[in-house]
Amino acid sequence: MQFSKNLEDNLEHLKQTLSLEKNFDVVYRVISIGGKKGCLLFVDGLTKDEVLLKVLQAWWSIKPEDMPTDAHGFSKKYMPYGEVGLIANEEDMIVQLLSGITAVLIDGYDKCLMLDCRTYPARSVGEPEKDKVLRGSRDGFVETLIFNTALIRRRIRDPKLIMEILSAGNSSHTDIAVCYMEGRVDEALLKNIRNRIKNLQVDALTMNQESLAEGIFPHKWYNPFPKFKFSERPDTAAACILEGNIVILVDNSPAAMVLPSSVFDIIEEADDYYFPPVTGTYLRLSRMMTAILCLLLTPTWLLGMMHADALPEWLAFTKLSDVTYVPLIFQLLILEFAIDGLRLAAINTPNMLTTPLSVIAGIVLGEYSVKSGWFNSETMLYMAFVTIANYSQSSFELGYALKFMRVILLLLTAVFDVWGYITGFVIAVCAIVFNKTIAGKSYIYPIIPFSWKELKKRFFRGRLPVIPESQNADVNR
């Protein structure tokens, strides 16, 4: 619906649409501007009051004979602020108003003036709890979109850095920022992602990036290995953009979604690059080995205990030292689910009780569960290692994917013995090999298709590439 030049008609329709008499936080104020009747609309709590005060002071000095004939002329002459826009459509105006932008309607003008002096309640840009580093910057993304884009822009001062703003959700109208480097990004993938977001038919992005991810990539939901890399670190997001990836930021979410992402991209961490090449390579390789052990340790040990008599002497220490009352497969499965239960309990436990409850849980579950005969000490040891090893991955999704594959491997090994172990291993490998990135490319590139040059970069942390002087001179020119 287009605005009319009659302020009373516009205001009467907005009162019904916005329920201005019921919504206490949607404030409207009728004022006089240069002898004309005007109306100021804003959402209380999302507007900078000091900016509005200064703008109103500037309007009070306008004389009737100085009033322009249209909204465009008024915005150029009497809007003493940087971010000002004009909107002729009421639906677009309502979306921006509910986003925190102040709307100004003036009698005789058929367009609404939008004054972007909004402010959002936000926490400080402190280091994220999950993506901590031993060395490096200590800032992280927050729930305010404009803060997150500023953190990336601060690190990439290049005019080729593009940040497109889109929205999704018929009710929420959630802002989505698509960030990429012009000239480095895959244009076909960018066009595909842009079209998918624009055509996304959802009522609201209630789960932020997860809702968006499920909307733009609904295929192969049964494969647990993640299709996206998530990070709460602006330095990681900036590095991914410079490598030609696309970073998607969603308002109200403190994480950046990086795509396309292979399994090697997801395994990488910021610490790999904040240390010298030798140390970074060691950290990367140790993380990969830990992931493999996390998947295979308990199924391999279970298979060995099923054939304990065939174990060589140098592996005799892995045999059970006590009598087994509960079959090993049930011990391992109970611990798999119990650990997740403890993790959920830790999340919901008040901070003041976390330490004493952890001590109690450690004593009860660690010592008395073994003494009571429910678990063997060897089972507790290997499951403790697997639990700690899961946290070596910065990606929750990858950690749970390894967990699901491990449980499948345990069940098949317990039922079908050696052939079950082999089948479970093949299923885990196929889940990785036949997975695809959102761009439709191999999930384990550069292994398939093979590229030795790229493979070395994935496994070994190299030195920072130096731009030749000739290219550097062209850039500076």
Image (tube, rainbow, N blue to C red):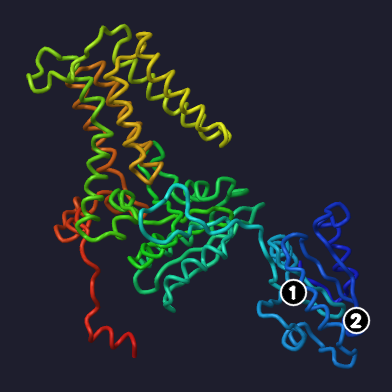
Please say if 280 is above or below 337: below
Q: Toward the viewer: 50 or 18?
A: 50
Which quadrant, please, contains the C terminus?
Answer: bottom left
Is residue 232 shown left or right of residue 313? right
Picture layout, residue 421 above or below residue 291: above
Label 2 sits on a secondary structure element that is strand
Residue at (42, 51) in percent of width and height = 230
Q: Which mark is residue 36?
A: 2
Q: Nearer the viewer, residue 14 or 206?
A: 206
Q: Is residue 152 left or right of residue 133?
A: right
Nearest the eye: 259 or 222: 259
Q: Based on the displayed image, in which of its 4 quarters is residue 19 positioned?
A: bottom right
Which residue appears farthest toward the left when viewing the image?
313
- Comparing 193 with 410, the one in front is 410
Q: Quadrant of residue 4?
A: bottom right
First in sequence, mark 2 or 1: give its number: 2
Residue 51 - label: 1
Q: Position of residue 54 (x, y in %)?
A: 78, 78
Q: Position of residue 47 (x, y in %)?
A: 73, 65
Rendered residue at 39%/71% (across/down): 181
Q: CA distance from mark 2 to mark 1?
A: 22 Å
- The amino acid beneath tag 2 is Lys
